[in-house]
Amino acid sequence: MGSKWRKAKLALGLNLCVYMPRTLEDPLPSIDSSERLSDVALLSPGNWDMTTPSRPMTPTPSSHGLRFSKSGTKSSKQMCSICLTKMKQGGGHAIFTAECSHSFHFHCIASNVKHGNPICPVCRAKWKEIPMQSPGSVAPSERALMSPIFWPQNDALMAVVRRLPPHHRDLNRRHIVPLCQAPEPGVFDDDELLDHQPVIAEGKDGSDNCSVRTIEIKTYPEVSAAPWSYSYDNFTVLVHLKAAASVARQNPSRNQIPLPQLSKASRAPVDLVTVLDISGSMAGTKLALLKRAMGFVIQNLGSNDRLSVIAFSSTARRIFPLCRMSDTGRQQALQAVNSLVASGGTNIAEGLRKGAKVMEERREKNPVSSIILLSDGQDTYTVTGSGSASNQTQQNYKSLLPFSIQGAGNTGFQIPVHTFGFGTDHDASSMHSISEISGGTFSFIETEAVMQDAFAQCIGGLLSVVVQDLQVVLECTDSNIHLGSLKAGSYPSRVTVDGHAGFIDVGDLYADEERDFLVSINVPAESSKSETSLLKVKCIYKDSLTKEMATMESNVVRIQRPEIIGKEIVSIEVDRQRNRFQAADAIAEARTTAEQGDLAGAVSILENFRRLLSETVSAKSGDRLCLALDAELKEMQERMASRHVYEASGRAYILSGLSSHSWQRATARGDSTDGSSLVQAYQTPSMVEMLTRSQAMLLGSPSAQRLVQPLWPFGSQPKPR
């Protein structure tokens, strides 16, 4: 029992250290089978390839807390309580032993307490003596935190601590080092200026890996031939779009962890604002996991990407300005995130307002902009009427949120907000409403351990945008043809008064991302024509990298019109997408019924549709999408077993599913590492790679064992090698 308790305390200490970044270009370290390296060890200063050419010399031993491991001593058999690597003889690491008897590598604990936090990350004891820089190298306000027994004359010791990021203004950068205590400006026009040098798309061999950015358009009429004497009122045509790939796969070298490496292929840089809940309910493990997830996001942003961090509880505060994620920017962002302390209430709307303020007042803009919002509670300050009153909640947020993060009529979305509801107590209706209003997605993080995976999947998409401001134009090619309805989920769509043209505003597409829309038209009877021309599809969009507008057109959709045909063959592609739209409608209806208190009626709605689904052409052919839809509906039925189960997880699971289907974009739901879940239906290869990278960082977790089983989107599978 004692051994298990000690391991639990060590695990808790893991989540409380300061994470130092590794860039995407840096290889992950090789793994010694005799040692267990945690995700913290991978991100700690000892494993980060900094600008110094080699490790500093080890300082001389002292009787005041700093000592070496010696052969035969207890220290040589211990592990550092932060990075969980052995403190063994000859390792070249200084060892700090605190008054509470816990021992750490000096560089690990110095990084952990460099904000002046004299708390043991294992037992939470308050220290009187902490590792710190000399009085001459720190600000006067920090000198009181240092113990007088540290030795400024020890050059070797100072060589160690000088590797830590300094607390001072960098004169080469306009912004101030972000500390929570720093004054917040009235106008957020202090964003770091962009690097206007062109992004080079180059592979390991120096060859150009940049894909030609375009959109693939395919169309499928529900039947390929119809008797010329027949007429149809609601003939369906499927419009299928797929964005080109922009991320090339590379094989890792033999001495690296075997996982896909993100390439250096050119892409559009991102402005990302994270709005994080630090209310009192986030204290403890939740906040530690949030810091770890943010550390992963920070280390995977490129030097041309910019990040700002907003923290909210009863009020909201910008703790880190919009800065490029260079090596220095990453260090400072990590300092800001690791200084967060949970307390207070939950004011989601104020956090969003401040996040929007950062976006509105920035001097320059990267091509891609997005906001990530995470909360584990309900907004008790500005919004009322959550839960069953979801429509009222959406109206409340629509009036409160700035216009810059709302849909701008028929011109597409301004800044999407991707929301993450954490745990069983968050306000799923409000989080879903915010994402719907802004054009983002809503993810349900049910299991604390997968928070980082959920963030990884999201940024895997954001860091691969290849198409922007996409508008789909549908034009009838015959005066007798008229458009009926357009099934486009949550995407704004409209049909002209005369019915001869229609428009769907899609917005951004990630690399390899697909969209499917169903178009209903009338098909008149023909006198003797051999074929009927129906419509053509045109895509107008902006290339996210070159910022140039482009147009792609499909061939004219035609069907054959013989006098007599045999058995009518329905297109599998059309049928499976019709099933998907109808499943989303059934889910929405069941959710409305459940919110009215009739859980049995909601379960019945889903059960009836499952029965209808099983009789469709695509389901009988063993279509994977239909099988996954059935599994999803069954899961939703189980989460409506009782009012308690529905309130705890059913509502959030269903809303996340609706978000995924309405935008045709991957969301995290429940245990996002479960490959059998429909949550992976819309994953792109870029998302899969980033998710796999996240799982690889958790080397001691079960998810690391699943690296050889990546999650594949529907309609695709691993290609044989």
Image: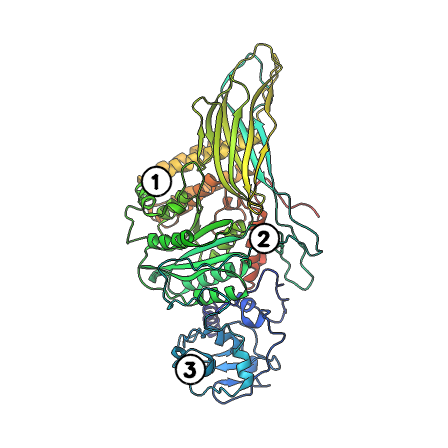
Is 522 situated above or below 394?
above
User: Circle 3 sits on which residue?
Assistant: 146
Viewer-closest of 697 and 73 = 697
State whether residue 691 is above or below residue 167: above
Q: Is residue 567 left or right of residue 591?
A: right
Label 2 neighbour load within 10 Å: few <14, some 14-19, many 20+: many
Residue 622 visible, this angle: no
Secondary structure at numbered mark 2: helix
For the residue pair 92 and 167, the one nearer the viewer reads as 167
Q: Which residue is mark 2?
A: 689
Give percent across and percent down for residue 534.
55, 22
Q: Which residue is mark 1?
A: 594
Task: Give the residue drawn at x 62%, y 44%.
Answer: 717
Residue type (three-letter) at the residue carrying disc 1 = Ala
Secondary structure state at the residue bearing disc 1? helix
Front in this rendered view, residue 432 or 31: 432
